[in-house]
Image (spheres, helix red, strand yellow):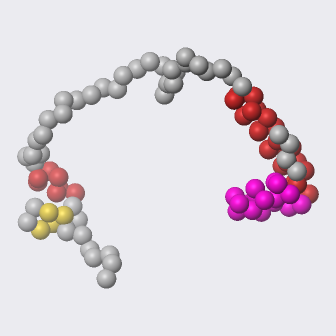
C-alpha cells in the first residue's frame, strides 16, 4: 500500500503531529514501508499455532489465597503522616 502526501497530512493531523511540507514525501515512504511489512506479516499462515505471552515457558510463583485480617495496624500506620483511631488522616483535596 502506497501513501500519498494528502493521506500522510491527514494521518499527521489525526495524530496531532506538526509535519512540514518538505517532510511529507519522506514520511510517506516510511509509512508505506511499514504498511508493506504489516501486509507481509498478515500473509503468514498461523493456523494451529497457539498464542503465547512469552518465548520462555515459565509459571508465576503463587501464594496460597488465604483471608487474613492483617493483625498489625501499628506497622501499617507507622508511615502515615497523620492518623486518627487506626485510620489514615488525609487533607481535604476537593471542596
Q: Nearer the viewer, residue 88 or 43?
A: 43
**Residue 28 vertical position relative to residue 86 in the rendered view, above or below:** above
Magenta span includes 60: no
Q: Quadrant of the N terminus?
A: top right
| Residue at left offset 85%, top offset 47% | 3
| Residue at left offset 81%, top offset 54% | 8
Q: Position of residue 17 (x, y in %)?
A: 73, 60
Name which quarter of the figure residue 35 lies in.
Answer: top right
Magenta span includes 20: yes
**Residue 52 vertical position relative to residue 92 in the rendered view, above or below:** above
| Residue at left offset 14%, top offset 35% | 66
Q: Position of residue 61 (x, y in %)?
A: 30, 26
Q: Quadrant of the C terminus?
A: bottom left
Q: Is residue 58 visible from the viewing direction of this image? A: yes
**Residue 79 vertical position relative to residue 55 in the rendered view, above or below:** below
In this picture, residue 58 sits left or right of residue 92: right
In this picture, residue 16 sits left or right of residue 23: left
Name which quarter of the figure residue 33 lies in.
Answer: top right
Name which quarter of the figure residue 78 lies in.
Answer: bottom left
Q: Position of residue 44 (x, y in %)?
A: 69, 22
Q: Is residue 23 visible from the viewing direction of this image? A: no
* Magenta span main SS: helix
In this picture, residue 32 sits left or right of residue 46: right
Residues in magenta, as a range: 6-21
Amino acid at each position: 500500500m502506497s501513501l500519498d502526501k494528502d493521506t500522510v497530512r491527514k494521518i499527521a493531523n489525526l495524530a496531532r503531529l506538526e509535519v512540514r511540507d518538505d517532510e511529507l514525501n519522506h514520511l510517506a515512504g516510511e509509512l508505506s514501508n511499514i504498511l508493506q511489512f504489516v501486509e507481509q506479516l498478515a500473509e503468514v499462515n498461523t493456523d494451529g499455532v497457539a498464542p503465547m505471552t512469552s518465548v520462555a515457558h515459565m509459571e508465576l510463583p503463587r501464594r496460597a489465597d488465604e483471608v487474613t485480617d492483617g493483625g498489625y495496624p501499628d506497622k501499617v500506620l507507622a508511615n502515615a503522616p497523620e492518623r486518627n483511631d487506626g485510620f489514615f488522616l488525609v487533607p481535604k483535596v476537593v471542596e
